[in-house]
Image: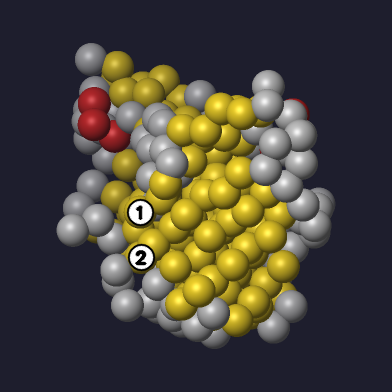
Amino acid sequence: RKEVEQDPGPFNVPEGATVAFNCTYSNSASQSFFWYRQDCRKEPKLLMSVYSSGNEDGRFTAQLNRASQYISLLIRDSKLSDSATYLCVVNAFQTGANNLFFGTGTRLTVIP
Amino acid sequence: DTAVSQTPKYLVTQMGNDKSIKCEQNLGHDTMYWYKQDSKKFLKIMFSYNNKELIINETVPNRFSPKSPDKAHLNLHINSLELGDSAVYFCASSQDWRVATTQYFGPGTRLLVL
């Protein structure tokens, strides 16, 4: 079983729409959670960390449900520049080190 | 003022060849990583070094040998390249391997084995 599972999409939404991505993780001992963004042919970059109480950064809201081992990302008022692949990332302590596990990503295309 | 840099950006080579990819970070981080992203975009860790010491070595063929001459550099040497090695290889760094802090990625090296 993969450490992190995401719906690969693609999600095609019009500008201004609200879109939500979900992710589940398998290791109940995981402590840290992140959303990364990867543009086409570029490297992944941190979008935001995900905190237990949920957190917001502008148009982006992240939620964590530890009981269900579920993470979500909500994007409001989508912009063309939001088109990218969104990677759900979870840590797991393995072989003596904190290791980050990446989901395969959810691809978003915002249409004019 | 690039934070994590990799060279080369593109690498096209024949099966059986040996090649190296270099990575440098100027963030002052202690920990560096190599990841492989395959054609299905799955990003998987290969190795992790902390201050020149190997701390993570996932199930990777021993044709792949990382080397860290100092904590700012982590190079990846690949012997006897195979078709299945074709992928994008990302180097990354973070402040401390003991906690799950933000990782900063290099631009990637696109390797194509013919």
Q: Position of residue A82 (x, y in %)?
A: 29, 34
The number of callouts visible is: 2
**What amino acid is labelled 2 in the image?**
Gln
Residue, disc 1: B5
* Residue projecting furthest to the top: A112
Nearest to the observer: residue A31 or residue A44: A44
Nearest to the observer: residue B31 or residue B62: B62
Q: Earlier in the sequence, mark 2 or mark 1?
A: 1
In the rendered structure, the answer to whether residue B21 lies left or right of residue B63 reads left
In the rendered structure, the answer to whether residue B29 lies left or right of residue B85 reads left
Q: Is residue A111 above or below residue B6?
A: above
Nearest to the observer: residue A107 or residue A42: A42
Q: Subunit of mark 1?
A: B
Q: Which mark is residue B39?
A: none
Q: Subunit of mark 2?
A: B
- The answer, for residue A24, to whether it is visible in the render is no
Residue, disc 2: B25
Residue A30: image quadrant is bottom right
Q: Is residue B52 above or below residue B26?
A: below
The residue carrying pointer 2 sits among few (fewer than 14), some (14 to 19) or many (20 or more) residues within 10 Å by Cα, namely many
Q: Is there a contact, CB below 8 Å, between mark 2 and mark 1?
A: yes
